[in-house]
Image (cartoon, rainbow, N blue to C red):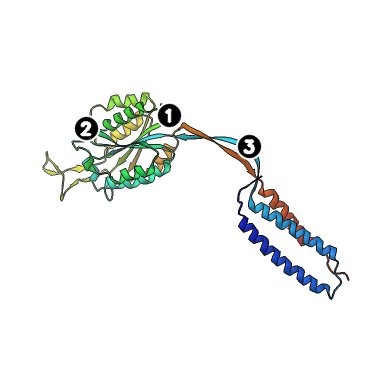
Amino acid sequence: MIWAYPDVKLLVILAIVFGGLYFIYLYRFWRINKQLKIKKHRLLMKMGLRIAYFILFMIAMAGPSVGTGFKEIKQEGKDIFIAIDLSQSMNAADISPSRLQRIKFELKNLIKNFDSDRIGLIIFSSEAFIQCPLTFDQNVLQLHLDGLNTGLVPNYGTDIAAPLELALKKFRTDENQDPKSKSIILISDGENFGENLNSTLDQLSEEGIKVFSLGIGTEGGSTIPKGNGVIMDNASSSPAISKLSTSTLKRVANETNGQYFEISDQAQEIPQLITSIEKIEGSITGSRTVEASANKYFYFLLAALGLAILDMILPLRTLSI
């Protein structure tokens, strides 16, 4: 028999309390016995009944489990690359406090939901770089997220195909080749100046790798801060306005059988993104065998309650008239 809560100290304390209180009860009857005629066998019957259901209550509290069977538990996991746009437009403040700062906050909460999965970080603008390879280490991921800023990458526009190509390359060279368990979270304001997106989407679709696009920004947009001023539009000689562009992000999601989500003044869809990723079937990463035994405390508790009720309703007279 296995005990779920083998707290011997607590059980001993309860037994001492019960014994002390019952000793006081018996002592009172002993004093009464000097003056009145008491049927001792009835008193012993009550004492035996109460001791019996007290012991049963103690056993139920300890959580007795019966059985020595074993059960194999399979561990599943997914591989997720998070591609984060670090172009200058991510400093726009149409999403408070800025697009990038908001994304950093949201991602810290997001990765906590996938502690059994491998997650990697890719940063990009006109080029893409591995910021953190696929890892189970949540602390490492949190440190990399803290350090994200637009100065980590060269800023000559935004090429959305670049991080997708890099993630695809890393997935292909990984030991785990199960396509069902691989996905990409693409985070950007949607501006795209690249030219190789078509072929990249075809390859991702062929290999069954889903892309979940997360657009950040507003339709009205905002100026882009730089130093003490803002970035200027060379063509119009006025402040450049960065707006959320959803067309490319939606196309990427649709052509890879993924989904599009948004953080804007009209939508806050991080919970929906988490739910969609959780539905992805993971690959078997390992298994472990655990002992499977059934907790039978209920039977002891039921027997104790039955005896307690019997003690209350049976007319066990202790006085002889």
Rendered-image quadrant of the N terminus? top right
For label 2, the residue is 193
Residue at x-position 33% and y-position 47%: 105
Residue 180 is labelled as: 1
- Residue 64 in sight here: yes
Q: Quadrant of residue 89?
A: top left
- Say whether disc 2 or disc 3 marks the residue closer to the N-terminus: 3
> Left or right of 292: which side holds 104?
left
* Three-letter code for the amino acid on which mark 2 is drawn: Phe
Sequence order check, earlier mark of 1 and 3:
3
The answer to whether the residue labelled 1 contacts the one labelled 3, judged by CB atoms less than 8 Å apart, is no
Could you say which quadrant of the image residue 20 lies in? bottom right
* Disc 2 element: loop
Q: Amino acid at mark 3?
A: Gly
Residue 243 position within the rendered picture, expressed as x and y whole percent measured from the top left: 24, 42
Find the distance from the CA under tag 2 to the CA under tag 1: 30 Å
| Label 1 to label 3: alpha-carbon separation | 33 Å
Q: Which circle, 1 or 3, is nearer the viewer?
A: 3
Specify few, some or many for label 2: CA neighbours under 10 Å numbering under 14, 14-19, or 20 or more: some
Task: Kindly tell me whether residue 267 is visible in this rendering.
Answer: no
Q: Secondary structure at mark 1?
A: helix
- Image x and y of residue 156, in percent: 18, 36
**Residues packed near mark 1 inside 10 Å, few (<14), some (14 to 19) or many (20 plus):** some
Front residue (pair 86, 246): 86
- Which residue bears the numbered disc 3? 69
Classify residue 82 as left or right of residue 43: left
Please tell me whether mark 3 sits on a helix, a strand or a loop: strand
7 vs 89, nearest the viewer: 7
Q: Amino acid at mark 1?
A: Lys
x, y percent for residue 128 = 26, 34
